[in-house]
Amino acid sequence: MPKRTNKRIVTIKIGSSVLLTQRNKLDEFRIAHIADQILSLKEKGIGVVLVVSGAVACGANYIHFSSEDKQLKMAAAGIGQAYLNSIFQQIFSKKGLRIAQILLTNELIDSKSKKKELNDLIHYYLQIGVVPVINENDVVDLNSFGGNDFLAANMAKLLKVDQLLILSTMTGSNFGVGGGKAKLQAVAMLKEKNIQASIVNGKTKNILLEALL
């Protein structure tokens, strides 16, 4: 297993309500502000693992569907994930940050061997200074973890992180699952494992630095 070289490791889950504007467009200014804060955290030796929502919502700009259209949601996720990742790549690279995309299903990490492989891979990324960007693989298994709040909690447990921070406005999303109840459940899951977890307003200036430094 790669040696843990970071002073601390944190998981940051970014909700759709933080990333998207009222017109359902990615807020590139906010993403850039988050990138600036992550750079500051990295400079202080803190390893950052991101769990990013918004793929289905981004794809909804190109594929229209109702809440019952599972297949169309999966199709939208594929378009939205590619777009979301490209914007993150552009913005983060301008800050000198390299990202790696990891798409997961619950079934994929259902075995000890797969969990170990994933754990080793993410720790390797952190060791070489890469920021893992994780999301549910909604294209092949929609809402496999029951939403990214639970995915973030599962990643926090797997990696034995020091803290999970959920960035949200607690308004929920029209395009996915989650909302305030799911976030509170995810926080409770981690508190049972003695992992610090909290929900903060992701639109507050410098919230990562205030909550994690």
Image: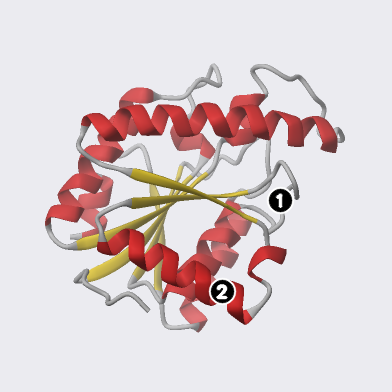
Residue 202 in sight from this viewpoint: yes
Residue type at numbered disc 2: Lys
162 over 140 or under it: above or below:
below
Question: Considering the image in quadrants, where does the N terminus appear?
Answer: bottom left
Q: Amino acid at mark 1?
A: Asn
Q: Residue at x 87, y 35 (%)?
A: 68
Q: Position of residue 183 (x, y in %)?
A: 55, 58
Residue at (47% x, 34% y) in the render:
85
User: Which residue, given by chain and number where applicable, does mark 1 sit on?
Assistant: 143
Of marks 2 and 1, the one in the foreground = 2
Viewer can see residue 205: no
Q: Is residue 2 left or right of residue 61?
A: left
Dot 2 lies on which element? helix
The mark nearer the N terminus, 2 or 1, is 2
Q: Which quadrant does the C terminus fall into?
A: bottom left
Q: Which residue is mark 2?
A: 115
Residue name at image x 59 percent, y 66 percent = 185
Kindly identify the residue that appears in the image at 66 percent across and 33 percent down.
78
Does dot 1 land on a helix, a strand or a loop?
A: loop
Residue positioned most to the left: 44
